[in-house]
């Protein structure tokens, strides 16, 4: 018996990285999965992979920045599987660069995906989740506690997502819907190979050392466990747990480290991401 036997899970941003790994893990544990993203080819490949392994999946091409796309995805999911028990608002990307070189449009584009995309997913899935007393899982980030240099838009979006999850949890409790905040640190994904316009650069190298990046499959197992247990929050990766602990219990130390990092960081005038 799988942990998610008889359950139906919808996951946005499911074409790669954490989203795809989480779909595979939920399917492995018995869930029927609704895989939602913009890249149709990758979605269809994932749908076929799950079907070949004996699972059930439905690929739905949708964009979390487009009104109506998530409602259509939910309708197709209910038509195929009859219900939705879990909705994971995973789609997101990161805008990076010195704030002096960014614009309001950069912030608007960041929030449109990372915050309003979560809200679109929430409102589309809420009627089904209320009916099934389901789980709404939100993909936060350690950056929602401890922002790094050059990540103001991304950190802003993840601080907002954390506040949204905390607020929704209290308000939805009487309806039987639980909210799980997933807070990863550095996990294998496409986010560090995606530019400020949201375009993936397939040939870009992972800028972080391999020992620091948790495999997506490992993170997905931890996230699936948190969802099944309806945990309030799951911080993923050891360095992520340390960062969150410091942000909560030693904010003075975090501020001192941030000041020192800014002083030591040399400007690179021709690099638009600095």
Image: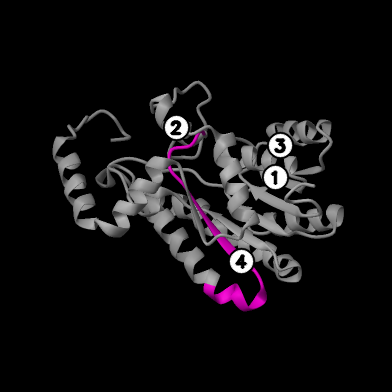
Residue 213's mark? 2
Residue highlighted by disc 4:
178
Decide whether residue 181 is among the magenta residues: yes
Category of crowding for the residue at label 1, using alpha-carbon neighbours closer than 10 angstroms: few (below 14), some (14–19), many (at least 20): many
Residue 153's mark? none
Mark toward the start of the polypeptide (3 vs 1)? 1
Calculate the distance from the C-alpha at mark 3 to the C-alpha at mark 2.
24 Å
Residue highlighted by disc 1:
26
Q: Nearer the viewer, mark 4 or mark 3?
A: 4
Mark toward the start of the polypeptide (1 vs 4)? 1
Up/down of 140 relative to 39, above or below = below
Identify the secondary structure beneath mark 3: helix
| CB under 8 Å between discs 1 and 2 | no
Q: Nearer the viewer, mark 3 or mark 2?
A: 2
Q: Quadrant of residue 60?
A: top right
- Toward the bottom, the furthest residue is 174
Residue 264 position within the rendered picture, expressed as x and y whole percent measured from the top left: 15, 35
Quadrant in which the C terminus appears: top left
Decide whether residue 204 is among the magenta residues: no
- Magenta highlight range: 170-188
Q: How is the image coloured?
A: one colour
């Amino acid at each position: 018996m799988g942990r998610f036997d008889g359950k139906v899970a919808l996951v946005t941003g499911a074409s790669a990285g954490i989203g795809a790994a989480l779909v595979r893990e939920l399917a492995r544990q018995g869930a029927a999965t609704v895989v939602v993203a913009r890249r149709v080819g990758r979605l269809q490949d994932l749908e076929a992979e799950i079907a070949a392994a004996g699972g059930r999946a439905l690929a739905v091409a949708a964009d979390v920045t487009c009104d109506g796309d998530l409602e259509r995805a939910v309708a197709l999911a209910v038509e195929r599987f009859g219900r939705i028990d879990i909705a994971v608002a995973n789609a997101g990307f990161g805008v990076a660069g010195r704030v002096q070189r960014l614009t309001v449009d950069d912030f608007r584009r960041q929030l449109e995906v990372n915050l309003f995309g979560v809200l679109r997913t929430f409102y589309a899935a809420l009627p089904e989740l209320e009916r099934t007393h389901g789980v709404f899982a939100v993909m936060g980030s350690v950056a929602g506690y401890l922002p790094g240099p050059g990540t103001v838009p991304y950190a802003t979006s993840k601080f907002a997502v954390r506040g949204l999850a905390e607020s929704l949890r209290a308000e939805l409790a009487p309806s039987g819907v639980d909210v799980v905040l997933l807070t990863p640190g550095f996990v294998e994904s496409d986010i560090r190979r995606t530019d400020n316009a949201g375009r993936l650069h397939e040939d870009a190298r992972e800028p972080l050392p391999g020992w620091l990046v948790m495999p997506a499959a490992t993170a997905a197992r931890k996230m699936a466990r948190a969802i099944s247990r309806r945990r309030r929050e799951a911080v993923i990766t050891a360095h992520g747990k340390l960062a969150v602990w410091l942000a909560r219990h030693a904010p003075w130390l975090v501020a001192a480290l941030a000041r020192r990092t800014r002083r030591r960081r040399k400007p690179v005038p021709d690099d638009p991401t600095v």
